[in-house]
Every structure is written in structure tokens, then in C-alpha cells.
Amino acid sequence: MVLENVIGASKVLIVAGKGGVGKTTVGATAALAAARAGANVQLIELEGRSQLGGLFGTGPLRFEPTVLMPGTPAGGRIVGRRITPDEALADYLGSHGLERLTGRLTMSGIIDVVTTAAVGVRDLMALGKIRQISDHGEADLVVVDGPAAGHAISLLRTPSGLARASIGGPIHSQAEAALEFLADESRCRVQLVCIPEATPVTECIDTAYTLEEEIGVALAPVVVNQVQPVLRGLINAVRGAELGPRTMAVVQSRVNQGRVQNTQLERLAEGLPLQQIHLPKLADAHLGTEAIHELANSYGL
Amino acid sequence: MASRQPPLLRSIASADAIVLLGAGGVGKTSSAAAIGIAAARQGRRVVVLTVDPAKRLIETLGLASAYASEVVAVEILEPQSLESVGSLHATMLDPGHTLSALVDEFAPTHQRATAIHRNRLFQTLVQSLSGLNEYMAAERFRQLLQDPRFDLVIVDTPPAQNGVDVLDAPARLTRLVDHRIYRTLLAPRSGILRTLNAATQLAARAIGKVVGASLLSDAIEFFALFEGMDKGFRDRADLVDQLLRSPSTHFAVVSTARPGPLDTAAWLSDQLRDREIKPAALVVNRRLTEVPAPAVDAHEALHRAVMDHNLIARSENEMIASSPLTKVFTAVQVPETDHDDPLAALAQMAEAFTTE
């Protein structure tokens, strides 16, 4: 498969999905696929609470970039960093000549007052930092392990909220720039992740429309994670099979899962005119670099 | 040190509140409802406060047609021979509604309340910019705890970090209200910067340059509107903080046997420990058990289905056994449910909280 068909053609990919669908894993897989294709990738976690560092065996990420994968044969690499909204705000103030003041109580007090009232300011700064990393060419591709779906929508809504709330001034122009960035499909796309079950698919479709219509951000192909292979002949084999009750329950549940999976994949296709990419459900619960490689293989990359 | 009874049993019998924390998608809301059912079966009058439930659970709990912040009764499936039956109610957090109600409660006049509702920053705040949910979840928790209809409040927090933010929200609000700058900013009645001292003026100008003077003055107006209400807000935040930290508020960490959620669970229990809170239990949802393989001559697809299941079950068992968490806590293992009916599934989950 061509990389563009997997992640879309943009410089920033924000990976979003409901908790538990494997958003972090999918983000890491996209980063690895791009690095294998020779891209210099920055993988960013926003909440300071994802397992990106653990996936690559480096431990928790910090604001300063950490090398997660030093070099692929094609010349790509992955560095990871954590950008929490507080760190982004401090970075912004620092780069605007306020570092001399940042230590002062008075200064931090006013920042507290402003950012507590205008809660979105910190989130806006995080988006701004991501934009800056990409626009300044620090990476060919920035992959953002976004917050869980509901929070992702409020994060991406922040620029329009703040653009309305502040007339003029740097926050206003930051918000406008963020809106422009989000609306430009050559710069930014959101990759939604779901699993083939009813509720996640419903929420994925809803989120997709909210993102496109309300925020105007372009969507990359949707990733369906934890897809189980179809076991041919299973339904017929169950009939008349002599199995203990517990084994029967397991087999029956696999049959049901297969049905649910088919129905939900069809529903997703009908509800969302986006290309679907399927990642297999891995048997091993331990996730690590090996698992990410296995998943990237299934992209054919 | 495995205790005789499931570790949450004591909380279910005697706590005033049980707060659940955990990664997204691990079944926090289902656990809250299941614990609620277990408690109601023991005669407690339970209300479950849910913050961000999955659609299916909204329907199961009968919240689909509830208006903002409404508390609804949940029908629970009862075993036949039950002597005392309590009750189970559920409610969903509506942050905007809760905030508006707070403003109305503390505003000295109707005009002031209207002015606050009209302030641009206030409107932005209500239109769910991130951050508001946590403050309001804490306040709603207080309301329910003091509601005479209930004697046990079960709180299902937002995922991971945001769950901890609920704990910190009241203290953060108190800190802000107490802040010297906030007081200074509130003082001037004519011209925003005129009466500030030199150092503060310098800082305020610098901030104004960065965030924009209009946003700064909006923020100042925002806080000025709250003048005189700060004591009410502050006392309330103090109260909520006390209630959250009271020994009769118990905490449990919820996870599945997958690496991501377990990692988050470990981090959350560290966060609780930093706040001198000892979780009452670790709840592990969707536990699988290995099953016997089919006869050798059975169809290949049957073998494959059982093998897939057993591989995952084994790998998750190892995961749980090697987790540092299970060395510290007795885990409540909640089996994966095989019910199609969501209420029956919750009732089945509830068994795990009442029997060993």
C-alpha cells in the first residue's frame, strides 16, 4: 500500500478515537509506516499520559524530543515528545520574550487568572506548538496521539471559541491561524480510530461529522483496529459439534463477534464515505515495538 | 493478604461515596452501575453520577430522554429472594447547567447573574471549552452527596488524567480566588491598570501584549463580575474538597487486563497515593478464562477459535499476574459477560462485587 493511502497527504496527522480503541497504537503504527518510507517523523503525545514511550521502550516522554527509532533503512526516523498544554503555554511565553518575567509571582498570577477564565488558551498553545513544529520543517510528518474523542472535539473547537471570544490581539490571531491550519488538508488531517463494535462505530461516525462540519478539518482514512480474521466454516462446524459448555460459549461468542464485526464494518462503510484500513487483533496482550512492527506490516509498508 | 470478602464489599456497605478512576474504554460506567446494583441489593439508596458514558449505557440506564442534570430511577433486575431492597438512580453531568445554577445561586442580584451569563469569556467557558467538566463534576458530586434521597454516591470520572483533575479542581479554584493578583485585579474600578502597583502593571502590560489587551480586560471583567461572590465560591470549593478527601469517600481504580489500561491504572494509583488516598480496590473488567480445546478431529475453525481465545486469556492472565498493581491491591476480577441484554449484563457484573 502507498503511505498516502494509509494516512492521507498532510504534514500533521491527529489520531483520535474513543478510549480503549487503540489510538496510541495506531498513532505509533502510522509513525512507523512513515519512517519506513523514509520520513523524519515526530510523534507527539498531548496528555502526558499515553504509553508511547513504553511502546518504543524508552520510558516516559518529555517536552524535549527523545529518539524513539534512530534510523530506518530508507533513512527515516521517529522522535517522540510530550507537549502538555501547560508546557506549550510556557514555551509560547518564553519565545515571546517573557522568560525574564515568568518566574515572578505577579506574572504567574496573571497567567493563572487569564488561563483559568479562558480555559482554552492552553489548548490553543498546544495546537500552536504542533503547527510551529510542522511549519518550521522540524519533521516531514507530525503524528499527534490526541486526547480521547470527546476531549479531542473540544480541543479542536477551542480555536473557533477563542476566535469569537477575543477581538484582536495575539490570542485572536493565534486562534485564526489555528483555524486556518485545521481547515487546510495539505497541512492537517484527523485519523479516526474505532473497533468493529456497535458503540465505537456509532461514535466514530458522529465524531467524523462533527469534525468535518463544525471544525472543517479533513479526515484521513479511518482505521478499524482489532479486526479478527474470518474463520471459514466456523458457523457450520458449530452445528453438531460436541463441545463442553465453556468451550461452546467461547466458540459461540466468536461466531457472534464475527457477525457483529461484519455488520459494523458495513455500517461504517455506509455511514462514512472514507477509505477503511483494518488492523488485526493481536493475540499477545503485551504491546511493544514488535507489535507495532507487526501492525505496520499489515499496512503493507 | 487476600481478604475473605471482596475488597469493595466494605465500601459498598458503608462508604458515603465511591469514586472510580481509570483509562478510557475499560468499563468505568458499567462498573459504576454494577457496583450500584450490588449496593442497592444490600438496601442502599444509590445514585450513579456519570460523566461521559457510552451511548448504549445512556440508553440502558434510562438517561436518553433525561433533561440536563435530571436524576432518573434505574430498573434493576432483582434476584427472587431479597429481603431489603434499596434503590438505584442515575444522572449524567451537564457542566453548563451545573455552572449556570452555581452562578444563579451565588449572584447577589438577578442583574449580576445576567451580566455574568452575557460575559464573552463566561459563554466560551460554558460552550464546553476543555477544563470545565472537572470543576463541575466535583460540584455535582457535592450536590448528590447532600441530597437526602441518596446515601451512596458512585462517581464515574472522565478518563485517566481528567479523572484526577476532578480531585484537584476545587483546590485549584480556591487557589485562584485567594491569589494576590486576582485580588489586585479586582480592586481597580476605574481603568484596568491604573491602580495596580508598578511591578504588577509591568507584568499585566506584558501579558496583555501576549494574550491581547482585550482578552485580559475580558478576564478582568469576568472576575470583577464575580466580586462579592468569591466567598461563596471559595467556601463551596473548600467544602467539595473536604468531601472528596473525607475517609467515607472511597476510591477504586478500574482497568482491563490490557497493557495500556493497566499502565494508566498504575499511574492513577500513584496519583492517589500522592494525594494521600489509598484506593479500596482495583477492578479488572472483561476477564477471560481459558477453556478446554475441542476433540482432535474437530473442524479446524473450531480449533482456531478456541486457540485464539486461549492465547488472549493466557497472555492477559500473565499480564495481571506480573502487574505491580496486583501486589498492592486485591483485585476484583469481573468476568467478560455473555449476555446480550445490557441490564442482564450489568446484573451479572454486579455478582462479582458481592461474591468472591
Image (cartoon, coloured by chain):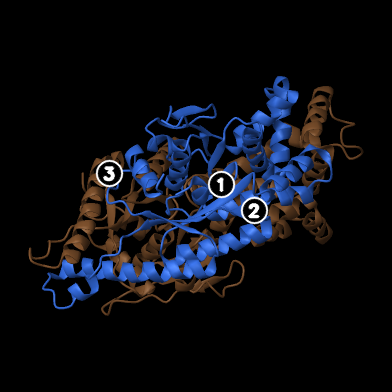
> In front: B292, or B11?
B292
Helix, strand or loop under label 1: strand
The amino acid at mark 1 is: Ile
Near mark 3 (Cα within 10 A), the count class, few <14, some 14-19 or many ≥20, is some
Cβ atoms under marks 3 and 1 closer than 8 Å: no
Q: In which quarter of the image is the C terminus of chain A?
A: top left
Chain A drawn in what color? blue
Residue under numbered circle 3: B326
Q: In this view, does A91 lie to the left or right of A205?
A: right
Residue under numbered circle 1: A14
Residue with the most extreme bottom position: B80
Cα distance between the residues tagged 3 and 1: 34 Å
Q: Quadrant of residue B205?
A: top right
Near mark 2 (Cα within 10 A), the count class, few <14, some 14-19 or many ≥20, is many
Q: Is residue A91 left or right of residue B286?
A: right
The amino acid at mark 2 is: Val
At 80% across and 23% down in the image, what residue appears? Answer: B199
| Residue B128 point in image, percent of width and height | 65, 55
Residue under numbered circle 2: A217
Near mark 1 (Cα within 10 A), the count class, few <14, some 14-19 or many ≥20, is many
| Residue B245 point in image, percent of width and height | 48, 45
Q: In which quarter of the image is residue B277?
A: top left
Chain the render paints brown: B
Query: Against B282, is A49 above or below?
Result: above
Cβ atoms under marks 2 and 1 closer than 8 Å: yes
- Can marks 3 and 2 be said to lie on one chain? no
| Residue A61 point in image, percent of width and height | 47, 32
Cα distance between the residues tagged 2 and 1: 10 Å
| Residue A265 point in image, percent of width and height | 43, 66
Chain letter of disc 1 in the image: A
> In front: B312, or A180?
A180
> In front: B354, or B152?
B354
